[in-house]
């Protein structure tokens, strides 16, 4: 949870214009400004306190209702979207929205924090929770969206102000953008809108992301880490450093990481084949995507036959391994298929005792 924030950036008041209607039977009223001060108190060009007292005795004023319901609803929106207020969790670990008669009775629960946040901050839920209308919440939220987006640092986000508006519409306050961006190396910014959305949706550990992004402080790598991270333990900063120390570029490292190829495996393949680490990282990463872990020997074998860009389909490998009753290693079976594209001939060779690609004699 972070410190509470005000209705507008920089400790400034939020000023907007609404119609002042004195009877629920009226459809239109005289427009005037409403000022929401940094402490969330409200001023209008008439005696709002008198209208509050009158409301206790059955009086009606749109301004009094706006001040007593729509503005607190907006405050809840800002608190939730910025992280100043956390959502509740159930005993079972689910995320819960607040109770809102007509919307969440009992409170709705969600499997992810971000899903719960999107519901909690929606005008329909807030209107039900605070006893106002979705339209009233949308009026003040639009003013807040404009103020916060206009004041936010454009160097942190691709698209600048327009990007901040888009993130606001997707439940992400500019304060959350600033906190994540400032935790990362300066060279990483600006990040794309989609990266911030994924970071929130996946509930990315900021400290973890800062650690891995510091190894390759470029936008592309940080964005890739966010999109490809299942959890903070999948990729470690130590693993990334080992790949960098092999001389890999960020893109080469991404190819290896995506396939779960360790730096030690690449180093071993370099020692055997004499190929460049960058070439091996991309090559081994591509094979890893079909469930194989080829070695430097396999690289040389395919290079000699000019087959480095040849990879069999995963389904064909599965069928071959199944047909061989598991008597051959999956990677060996795959390399055999790269050398000899006929699954029937490869299977016949396996049944004849061949167990490795080095033993295979391809047909002419």
Image: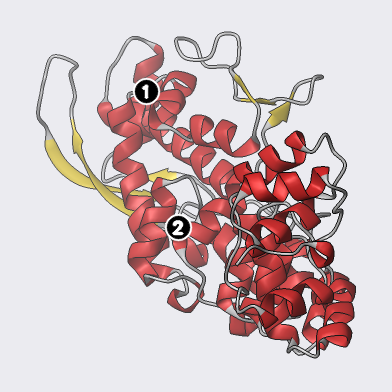
Farthest front residue in view: 364
Q: For marks 1 and 2, give the CA distance.
A: 21 Å
First in residue order: circle 1 vs circle 2: 2
Across and down, in percent, residue 312 comes to: 60, 55
Front residue (pair 98, 200) = 200
Q: Is residue 1 visible?
A: no
Q: Is residue 172 visible?
A: yes
Relative to 65, does residue 155 appear above or below in the rendering?
below
Give the structural element (helix, strand or loop) at label 1: loop
Across and down, in percent, residue 214 comes to: 74, 79
Residue drawn at (67%, 38%) of the image = 319
**Which residue matches tag 2?**
8
Residue drawn at (18%, 28%) of the image = 21
157 lies left or right of 161: right
Q: Quadrant of residue 163?
A: bottom left
Q: Which mark is residue 132?
A: 1
How many other residues sit within 10 Å of disc 1, few (<14), some (14-19) or many (≥20)?
A: many
């Amino acid at each position: 949870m972070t410190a509470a924030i005000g209705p507008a950036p920089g400790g400034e008041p939020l000023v907007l214009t609404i119609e002042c209607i004195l009877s629920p039977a009226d459809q239109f009223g005289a427009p005037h400004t409403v000022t929401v001060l940094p402490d969330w108190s409200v001023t209008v060009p008439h005696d709002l306190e008198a209208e509050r007292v009158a409301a206790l005795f059955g009086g009606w004023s749109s301004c009094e209702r706006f001040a007593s319901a729509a503005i607190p609803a907006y405050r809840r929106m800002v608190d939730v979207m910025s992280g100043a207020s956390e959502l509740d969790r159930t005993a079972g670990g689910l995320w819960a929205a607040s109770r809102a008669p007509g919307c969440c009775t009992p409170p709705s629960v969600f499997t992810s924090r971000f899903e719960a946040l999107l519901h909690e901050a929606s005008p329909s839920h807030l209107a039900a929770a605070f006893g106002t209308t979705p339209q009233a919440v949308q009026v003040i939220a639009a003013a807040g969206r404009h103020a916060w987006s206009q004041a936010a640092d454009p160097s942190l986000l691709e698209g600048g102000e327009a990007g901040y508006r888009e993130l606001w519409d997707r439940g992400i306050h500019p304060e959350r953008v600033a906190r994540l961006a400032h935790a990362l190396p300066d060279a990483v910014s600006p990040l794309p809108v989609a990266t911030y959305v994924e970071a929130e949706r996946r509930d990315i550990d900021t400290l973890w992301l800062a650690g891995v992004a510091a190894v390759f402080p470029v936008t592309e790598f940080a964005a890739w880490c966010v999109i490809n991270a299942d959890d903070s333990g999948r990729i470690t900063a130590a693993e990334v450093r080992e790949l960098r120390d092999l001389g890999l570029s960020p893109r080469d490292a991404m190819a290896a990481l995506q396939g779960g190829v360790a730096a030690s495996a690449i180093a071993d393949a370099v020692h055997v084949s004499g190929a460049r680490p960058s070439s091996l990282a991309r090559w081994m990463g591509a094979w890893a995507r079909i469930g194989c872990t080829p070695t430097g020997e396999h690289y040389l074998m395919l290079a000699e036959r000019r087959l480095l860009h040849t990879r069999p389909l995963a389904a064909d490998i599965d069928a071959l391994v199944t047909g061989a009753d598991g008597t051959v290693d999956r990677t060996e079976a795959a390399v055999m298929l790269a050398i000899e594209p006929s699954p029937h001939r490869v299977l016949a060779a396996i049944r004849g005792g061949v167990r490795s690609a080095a033993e295979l004699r391809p047909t002419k």
